[in-house]
Amino acid sequence: MNTIAEIAGVIRKLKSALIFTHVRPDGDTLGCGVALSRALDLLGIRNQLLNEGEVPEKLRFLEGTEQILREPTIDAEGYICVDTSDETRLGELQKTFLKGAGKGKITVNVDHHVANTRYCRYNFVRDRASNCENVAELVRALGVKADERIANALLTGMVTDSGGFTHNDVNGDTFREAGLCADCGADVNRITYETFRRQSKARAALYAETISSLRFLLNDALAIALVTQDDLKKHGLKQDATEGIVDFGLTIEPVEVSVCLMEVREGQYKASFRSKGRINVNEVARTFGGGGHVLASGCMLFGSAEEAFDRISYAVAQAGNL
């Protein structure tokens, strides 16, 4: 694996770059992308920030997200992937990435997932509460002084991926990086309001209905929430409205693992896992072809909802010897 200084050296030599963020973008991947794009702007390196889908409504307050493209319009020299554990997490942009890599584009990977496959020519992977902590270090290594846009982007990723600094992987480094962002002008109050507190009446109704029908399994060690397409249509919401629902289960004793199952289409479910620490949900997700972190991971499941409940329950029981 490369050092952050080596990654910075590679990037500084680029004349142009594409910055790739992962499917179903969250605050961390968008924060990384916006911050790095702004840093490259300040260095005079032409760049474009990419994502295959739409920016979640609650993250559109972040300056720089309006510049995100679904496909590139330049033939860039370098391809930089942030907060993305493998090529499949790029979604439709995987085709663009693989085509460029096959042509000898300089590929760079900056990530914090333990499941990262080191799929680029240059890789920096450090397990931290958020990948924005890694990108904050990279921005400094590039010789860029963070301005307000960079600081807001980085702090957004730190706040959201750490669950408001409540997850077990938060440490002193997390707070030190967050403090530097605040010193550079990040609006802590607005970031926490937009990402955690503000929601529509429709989303509140969906949340209440979903939480009221939680399924408890394995002697209450496992809690599973289910959100169907009919639920979303009923309230006029999109898939990003389900973000954060998975965290509720961990507030309940004696739940050890919380899961949110979101129906993507008939017979396909996106599963998001959270753990209090006793059970490694990265291992659970990997049994279904997914992955992520020890405390937070995800995967796709196919079949009926009841089949998904059974498979998740069995996998969690195996991982935790329950």
Image (cartoon, helix red, strand yellow):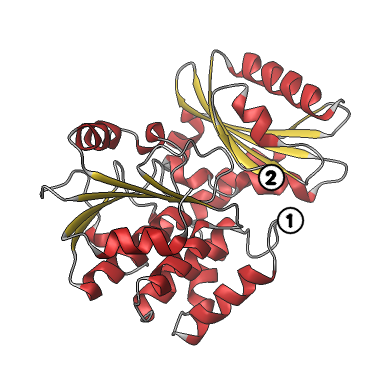
Q: Is residue 62 visible?
A: yes
- Is 114 above or below relative to 189? above
The image shows residue 203 at horizontal and vertical percentages of 51, 50
Label 1: which secondary element = loop
Residue at position x 62%, y 68% from top?
174
In the depicted view, which residue is nearer to us: 176 or 58?
Answer: 176
Using residue 250 as the reference point, say whether residue 105 is left or right of it: left
Q: Which mark is residue 289?
A: none
Using residue 306 as the reference point, say whether residue 100 is left or right of it: left
Please rate how many residues cluster around mark 2, counting C-alpha atoms within 10 Å: few if below 14, some from 14 to 19, many from 20: many
Residue at position x 80%, y 24% from top?
317
Q: Which mark is residue 295?
A: 2
Q: Which residue is tagged 1?
A: 168
Using residue 82 as the reference point, say whether residue 221 is left or right of it: right
The image shows residue 90 at horizontal and vertical percentages of 35, 38
The image shows residue 233 at horizontal and vertical percentages of 43, 35
Residue type at mark 2 is Leu
Residue type at mark 1 is Asn
Q: Earlier in the sequence, mark 1 or mark 2?
A: 1
Count of labels in the image: 2
Label 2: which secondary element = loop
Q: Are marks 1 and 2 in contact (CB under 8 Å)?
A: yes
- Is 112 above or below relative to 4? above
Please rate how many residues cluster around mark 1, counting C-alpha atoms within 10 Å: few if below 14, some from 14 to 19, many from 20: few
- Is 18 above or below relative to 180? above
Q: Quadrant of residue 292?
A: top right
Residue at position x 61%, y 57% from top?
129
In the depicted view, which residue is nearer to us: 57 or 72?
Answer: 72
Task: Estimate the spatial distance between the alpha carbons at disc 1 and disc 2, rounded to whole Å.
Answer: 8 Å
